[in-house]
Amino acid sequence: MNKVILLAVLCVLTACGAAPTRLVYSSGFSFANYDYVIIGRPDGQSASTSLYGMDVEFANLLSKYNMNVVGEKEYARMAHDDQKRTLIARMAISSNDDRIVSTVSFDDAVSGRTGSSVTGFTEGDMFDTEDREAAFKSVADTVSKALQRDKNLQITDGR
């Protein structure tokens, strides 16, 4: 019976076009403990696969939730107490013939420990702008909800 209910829920979500997204927290992690973020490449190298400008969009999104986006050089000059309140957000996007997988991993900048990761799965072509935007939106919506919950924020669009 539980399997039938689960299948029904999955069918409804698929029919509505909802993109499955998974948010995972490590034990004791909360975005409320962090005020700064560095947007990093997935492998830490500047020559990583292009993120199609989504890294800039993601930085703007995090700024909206009172996260100060800093660069690696700025981080190196920060006081140790501020460094302890810094996350490194590593973004990646990949695809196969008809599915886009977008991920963001939030790592503690001092310890390197992964605090949270978000993975979004959407159908589409990586080279199609609308499909890439849908993949980004699925992850961004999940991160937005987590930040609002953890930081106890209420964000409105002014309408």
Image (spheres, rainbow, N blue to C red):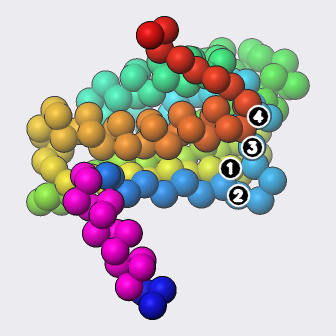
Is the C-beta separation of discs 1 and 2 under 8 Å?
yes
Q: Which residues are magenta?
A: 4-17
Dot 2 crowding, Cα within 10 Å, few <14, some 14–19, many 20+:
few
Give the left or right position of residue 104, taking residue 145 as reference: left
Q: Is residue 12 magenta?
A: yes
Circle 4 is placed at which residue position?
A: 32
Coordinates of residue 113 in the picture (x, y in percent): 71, 51
Q: Residue at point 45% right, 90% down?
A: 1
Q: In front here: 5 or 119?
A: 5
Q: What's the amino acid at mark 1?
A: Gly
Circle 2 is placed at which residue position?
A: 26
Dot 4 crowding, Cα within 10 Å, few <14, some 14–19, many 20+:
some
Circle 3 is placed at which residue position?
A: 30
Upstream in sequence: badge 1 or badge 2: 2
| Eye-nearest disc, 2 or 4 | 4
Q: Which mark is residue 106?
A: none
Q: What's the amino acid at mark 4?
A: Ala
Label 4's element? helix
Circle 1 is placed at which residue position?
A: 115
Give the left or right position of residue 159, taking residue 14 as reference: right
Is the C-beta separation of discs 3 and 2 under 8 Å?
no
* Whether residue 3 is visible: yes
Image: 29 above or below 31: below
Give the left or right position of residue 153, taking residue 135 as reference: right
Is the C-beta separation of discs 4 and 1 under 8 Å?
no
Q: For the residues marked 4 and 3, what is the alpha-carbon distance in whole angstroms?
A: 5 Å
Q: Residue at point 35% right, 78% down?
A: 7
Q: In front here: 34 or 108?
A: 34
Q: Quadrant of residue 10?
A: bottom left
Upstream in sequence: badge 1 or badge 3: 3
